[in-house]
Image (cartoon, grey):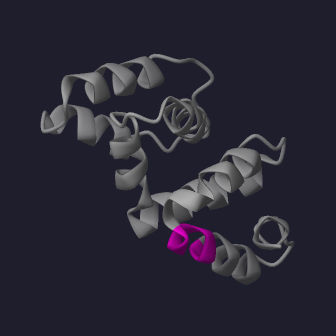
Amino acid sequence: MLKKLALDERWQVRDAATFALVETGEASVDAFLELLETPDRYAKEGISEEIQRTGYILDLIEYLGGPDLDRKAKTVRILTSMHQVGFSTPLREALEAGENRPEINVELMQILQTGDVA
């Protein structure tokens, strides 16, 4: 239901639904992946903004270095989609800070090198 509401025509409903998804933490990875792979650029931008605004992007960056390869692959797709609609700054900042494990930095560099950036 939250996924459906995250695509609602009213921005307040979209923001509340996206925030609720963020609050579910790791369980929201599949929902965010599905939402960010829709053709609706406006929805992608709104969801990306909420992920960034709430700080959930930091969790996603950490997932890049985790042992769960499925979650890591999904996270790469989420962050790549965010990068493609112009939400790249947190990725660049995380890379430039130099505080991540090397495997996270490698993933961040690969995401930032993908094309189709807004």
Could you tell me how many numbered marks the image carries?
0
Residue at x-position 34% and y-position 53%: 58
From the viewer's side, name the closer residue of 71 and 93: 71
- Left or right of 75? Residue 20 is right
Residue 30 spot, x, y in % from top left: 67, 49
Q: Look at the image and say whether residue 27 sits in the magenta stretch.
A: no
Residue 63 spot, x, y in % from top left: 40, 42
Quadrant of the rendered structure where residue 28 is?
Answer: bottom right
Residue at x-position 56% and y-position 42%: 82
Looking at the rendering, in which quadrant would you find the C terminus?
top right
- Left or right of 31? Residue 56 is left
From the viewer's side, name the closer residue of 27 and 9: 27
Relative to residue 78, is residue 102 depicted above or below?
A: above
Quadrant of the rendered structure where residue 65 is?
Answer: top left
Relative to residue 75, is residue 24 depicted above or below?
A: below
Residue 25 spot, x, y in % from top left: 50, 64
Relative to residue 8, is residue 112 depicted above or below?
A: above
From the viewer's side, name the closer residue of 54 and 2: 2
Residue 67 spot, x, y in % from top left: 38, 33
Residue at x-position 86% and y-position 72%: 9
Report the predominant secondary structure element of the magenta stretch.
helix
Question: Which residues make up the magenta segment?
Answer: 19-24
- Left or right of 45? Residue 42 is right
Visible in this render: residue 39? yes
- Left or right of 3? Residue 104 is left
Residue at x-position 46% and y-position 36%: 68
